[in-house]
Image (cartoon, grey):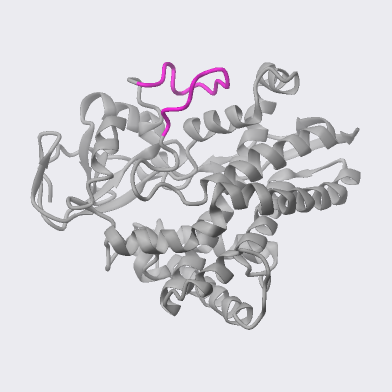
Amino acid sequence: MSNAPIVHIDLADFWADPYPALREMRKNTPICFVPELNRTLITKRDDIVRAEPDIASFSSLQPDGLMTRLMGENLMRKDGEIHRSERKAIFPTVSPKTVRDVWTTKFHAAAEMILADIKQQGNGDLFTLFATRLSGEALRIITGIDGLSWQEMDQTSQAMIDGISNYTGDPAIEATCKTATKKIDAAILMALARESDLPDLLTIMQAADLPKASIYANIRLAISGGQNEPRDVIAGIIWALLTHPEQLAMVLAGEICWLQVFEEYVRWMAPIGMTPRRIARDITFGRIDFKTGDDVFFMFNSANHDEDYFQNPEQFDITRDAGKHIAFGAGPHFCAGAWASKALIADVALPLLFDQLKDIRLTQDVQIGGWAFRGILNLPCAWGQK
């Protein structure tokens, strides 16, 4: 175990709102051991940016880690040449050019279809009706796994997310996660028999002759992150703008672009709050001694509130320069789906929603939760038609 100072947290409070505890850590113990998580947390942006590329010390290889055990060894849990080769293999699916020329049009069609369905309702939970459904439909398109409905995409994604953040070892959560991966594997097997002229993830990985285990593990990874993260950001930005009407007015007037709104939101409430690493060799980092095998969390959510970079970081402010955020990572594991996520949310979901639904307003309070993965949990709204 590292010799970092010990800091205790209340897990329920941390799940409800991790930011006060993280603020105290940044101020007093920026690298600290949290017994309730059995991990050493690194909370300052500069430390994370310096440590994450150092794969010789801070390794992604975690053969006994929750993600590897429950979802298989995907590219997030590989380093060096193996990681680079798999990332290169999937690049044709997620490249900026493919996103621009192929996926954005399909995302747009899916969003139009969904909005046509919900316009007449006049009220409902936009978290499910719009954000969840659009994320699921987009994921069916980009992965090539159309044997799962958008509802199943969401259910299996959430089960895996719950499983890989199950640091308290709840056996029911683990069992639900394993059931979800079996359902995904059955859908992959069915999809392997079809032909596609699209550069979807399954088609591209098959063409690259990736091993079967890598194909399955990386599809599971794409579903786990490609569903909940866009879902939570779409719903979260709608909520943030509705609760900051002066900022919504600026966007609708064309004073602030949707991409700038996106960047500020993921800084403010990072959908992925942390990423785990394992110490690969005895090192001293930030005046803390680490031993080989120590487990570490890079706290992206804390880095994105680092006062050294962001003034009044707890405030949602679309006029700020949020360019220094590291919501997508800060090293070789920078999120491969970042361009697709930005296109889905900033180019399609938000502009279309606010263009086609009139006078969107909250009808009840929303619930917010999570620290490893964080977002709003509901979005009850009413609206009219334009």
Where the C terminus falls, by quadrant?
A: top right
- Is residue 170 within the magenta segment? no
Q: Where is residue 138 in the image (x, y as percent from the top left)?
A: 67, 56
- Does residue 250 appear in this view? yes
Q: Position of residue 133 (x, y in %)?
A: 71, 54
Is 287 situated above or below 98?
above
Residue under the point 48% across and 25% down: 322
Q: Where on the picture, by quarter, is residue 164?
A: bottom left
Q: Where is residue 356 in the image (x, y as percent from the top left)?
A: 84, 36
Which residue is at the front of the view, 29 or 217?
A: 217
Q: Position of residue 111 (x, y in %)?
A: 77, 48
Q: In this view, does 3 lie to the left or right of 321?
A: left
Q: In this view, does 36 lie to the left or right of 263?
A: left
What's drawn in magenta, residue-wise? 309-325
Residue under the point 66% across and 63% down: 140
Which residue is at the front of the view, 9 or 335?
A: 335
Residue under the point 68% across and 54% down: 102
- Does residue 169 appear in this view? no
Which residue is at the front of the view, 380 or 164?
A: 164
Q: Where on the picture, by quarter, is residue 89?
A: bottom left
